[in-house]
Amino acid sequence: MGKFLHDFKEFALKGNVIDMAVGVIVGGAFGKIVSSLVNDILMPVISIVTGGEGYKNLKYVITEARPAADGVAAVEEVAVNYGLFIQNIVDFVIIALSIFVALRVMMRFMKKERAEEAAAPAPEPSAEERLLTEIRDELRSRK
């Protein structure tokens, strides 16, 4: 049991796991923001343009709701709610676009950083490295 806990602690405290946990938390919050943007800002504007009915109410009714024969229970409506599906597609597109833009910006910064590293002059070799290079060159010349 002690080895298991030690291995788990080593795994859980690695930087990648913590970074991933932060990413999941931030991603969840970002999803809520995008859903609010779509539900509360974009869809009402789109529904005004399309006739004011609202996307949440768009559906294809297969069977209408009706009271049951005994008058107490009701038979619920059976419908294909394609308005909610459209709304979820818009959510997905906005999230995917945001992630694409964020990754593109990150890659641009990483590419710029690599170019700067490649353009930087190589550090001067240490005395030990110079000595080893001389020894290597001397051994090559003796062959």
Image: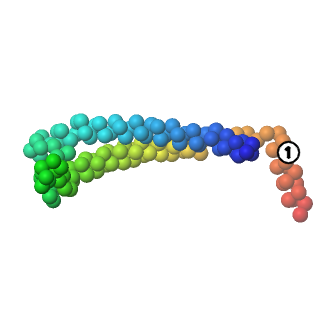
Residue 28 location in percent, x, y? 42, 39
Q: Which amino acid does label 1 sit on?
A: Leu
Q: Circle 1: is it few (<14), some (14-19), or many (20+) Cα within 10 Å?
A: few
Q: Seen in the image, is 122 located left or right of residue 110?
A: right
- Residue at the location (12% across, 43% down)? 53
Q: Seen in the image, is 140 located left or right of residue 110?
A: right
Residue closest to the eye, 33 or 53: 53
Q: Seen in the image, is 89 located left or right of residue 142?
A: left
Residue 101 location in percent, x, y? 38, 44
Q: Quadrant location of the C terminus?
A: bottom right
Q: Quadrant location of the N terminus?
A: top right
**Corner quadrant of residue 120:** top right
- Residue at the location (35% across, 37% down)? 32
Q: To which residue does mark 1 refer?
A: 131
Residue 122 location in percent, x, y? 67, 42
- Residue at the location (84% across, 54% down)? 137
**Corner quadrant of residue 9:** top right
**Corner quadrant of residue 10:** top right
Residue closest to the eye, 116 or 49: 49
Residue 106's place in the image compared with 82, above or below, is: above
